[in-house]
Image (spheres, rainbow, N blue to C red):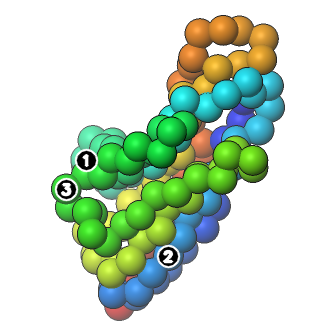
Amino acid sequence: QVQLVASGGGLVQPGRSLRLSCAASGSIFSIIAMGWYRQSPGKQRELVASITSVGNTNFTNSVKGRFTISRDNAKNTVYLQMNSLKHENTAVYYCHANVVSRWYGPPRDYWGQGTKVTVSS
């Protein structure tokens, strides 16, 4: 099995920064892509940012220029650097990974437990 553990959430003032981390562990052969989704009460879960194994990135329009996503392949870890945070960024952020297992060839989707980000003054 593969596990994703997210961390780094918390309370932050508007305009400040926060960095989320997500580490994948378990029977991993390769990770095709990792990313971050967020969900607020009454809203659908949405993609925030993703990064592929070769470094291609994708961001939702509302965070372009403020958020960056990066990875450490040796640690199977993805980071989301969130700058210039706004109230609207308040949400539970979920780590996601598309993983090829050591024991099963086809890639599968895995989700972390979520980490809460609250932007408030």
Question: Is residue 38 or residue 55 the one in the foreground?
Answer: 55
Disc marking residue 61: 3
Q: Which residue is mark 1?
A: 43
Q: Nearer the viewer, mark 2 or mark 1?
A: 2
Q: What is the x, y in percent for residue 32?
A: 55, 30
Instruction: Quote the CA–CA distance across marks 2 and 3.
Output: 19 Å
Please indicate whether residue 104 sits to the left or right of residue 54 in the image. right
**Callout 3 crowding tier (Cα within 10 Å): few <14, some 14–19, many ≥20:** few
**Callout 2 crowding tier (Cα within 10 Å): few <14, some 14–19, many ≥20:** some
- Of mark 2 and mark 3, the one earlier in the sequence is 2
Disc marking residue 18: 2
**Residue found at x 58% / y 53%:** 71
Amino acid bearing label 2: Leu
Q: Is residue 91 above or below residue 119?
A: above
The answer to whether residue 71 is seen in the rendering is yes
Question: To which quarter of the image does residue 62 belong?
Answer: bottom left
Q: Is residue 78 above or below residue 85?
A: above
**Residue found at x 77% / y 38%:** 25
Q: Are marks 2 and 1 in contact (CB under 8 Å)?
A: no
Question: Is residue 99 or residue 93 the one in the foreground?
Answer: 99
Please indicate whether residue 61 sits to the left or right of residue 50 in the image. left
Q: Secondary structure at mark 3?
A: helix
The answer to whether residue 110 is seen in the rendering is no
- Of mark 3 and mark 1, the one earlier in the sequence is 1
Q: What is the x, y in percent for residue 72?
A: 66, 53
- Of mark 2 and mark 1, the one earlier in the sequence is 2
